[in-house]
Image (tube, grey):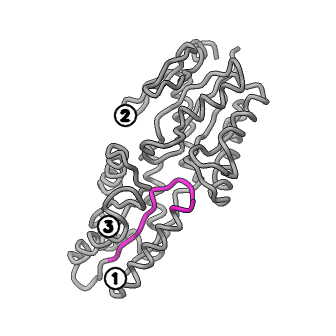
Amino acid sequence: MTTPPALLIAGHGTRDEGGAEALRTLVRMLGERLPDVPVAGGFFGTPASPLPLDDAVDGLAARGATRLAVIPLLPAPTGPLPDALPSALERAAQRHPGLGYACDAELGPHPKVLDVLERRLDEALAAGARTPEDRARTTVLLVGRGATDPYANAEVARAARLLWEGRGFAGVETAFVSQAAPDVPAGLDRCLALTAAAPAGRPGRIVVLPYFFLPDSLLERLHLQAEGWAAAHPGTEVFGAAAIGPAAEVADAVMERYRAMVAGDPLPGGAAGGWRAAEDARGTDGTALRTAAVAADAGER
């Protein structure tokens, strides 16, 4: 029987210990659910992270892993980065001859992730969050990191539309913490216009909802921007929601992606899953991008 590939969770770089601990919690949850699969997690794209991706790869190799199924724990693509995930993976794999990997698409607005976002909204609003009347006077500002790549930012808008559909909110607007417009104050201005249409006698309110899996310094910046806007608009109720975090639904979504990769099934949105014979291919920047291991795994298990 072929040993199953190890599972590697890749987060976008953070120096925040709270974000690192949240990723450790998710790794522990997945390890309990997949007792026969080595699981690790780490961050790429930021020096001096408390949980580097390189260390996670080294740890899996030390446990005997020869193939890695890599799932980026990202709500949307990052856009261009000085140290992108393919480069980080290739650099780590070069230290371990014979180590293969396959990298999945970003986790994105998976239905289970949308369920967690809705719960974070309800938690922020506390009492009276779920009645149709309460939903009808609530406008949501879904805030992403922001990127220079418009396609990456468009994924945040897609998530906002999916969150709005069928949930009865007055609207779900988008904003970005950096690198893209609208910024958080401008997004709140747009939400303010929607609150004017709240039912008579029930003032409108705004929930600022981070589209972040894990807390980091950008999340702190988001909170400061929202608090500054709220202080300048004392007549408007503004609630702040928590990040998605290591929720059970996130673990479920990661397990679903992992199993699809191992089985070679097509993934949502047309992302290519499954295993290909190990080979080296050259990216446009000349960097060798290693694909991963053997397709026969699904049939042999």
The disc label shown at residue 236, or none: 1
- Residue 107, position as x, y percentages in the image: 48, 42
Q: Position of residue 223 (x, y in %)?
A: 48, 71
Residue at image x 67%, y 44%?
Answer: 52
Indicate the position of residue 78 as horizontal and vertical percent values. 45, 45
Whether residue 110 can be seen here: no
Residue 200 in picture, x, y percent from top left: 21, 82
- Residue 301: quarter of image: top right
Q: Earlier in the sequence, mark 1 or mark 3?
A: 3
SS at circle 1: loop
Which residue, given by chain and number where applicable, does mark 3 sit on? Answer: 187
Choose top left, top right, bottom left or bottom right for residue 149: top left
Q: Which is nearer the N-term, disc 2 or disc 3?
A: 3
Label whose residue precedes the other's in the sequence (1 or 2): 1
Residue 290 visible in image: yes
Element type where label 2 sits in the image: helix
Q: Secondary structure at mark 3?
A: helix
* Mark 1 and mark 3 residues within 8 Å of each other at the beta carbon: no
Q: Amino acid at mark 2?
A: Gly
- Of badges 2 and 3, the one in the foreground is 3
Based on the picture, tell me whether residue 210 belongs to the magenta stretch: yes
**Residue bearing mark 2:** 269
Q: Amino acid at mark 1?
A: Thr
- Quarter holding the N terminus is top right
Q: Which mark is residue 2?
A: none
Residue range (magenta): 205-218
Placement of 51 over or under 204, stated as above or below: above
Cα distance between the residues tagged 2 and 3 = 28 Å
Residue density around tag 2, few if under 14, some if 14–19, many if 20 or more, within 10 Å: few
Disc 1 crowd rating (10 Å Cα; few below 14, some 14-19, many 20+) is: some
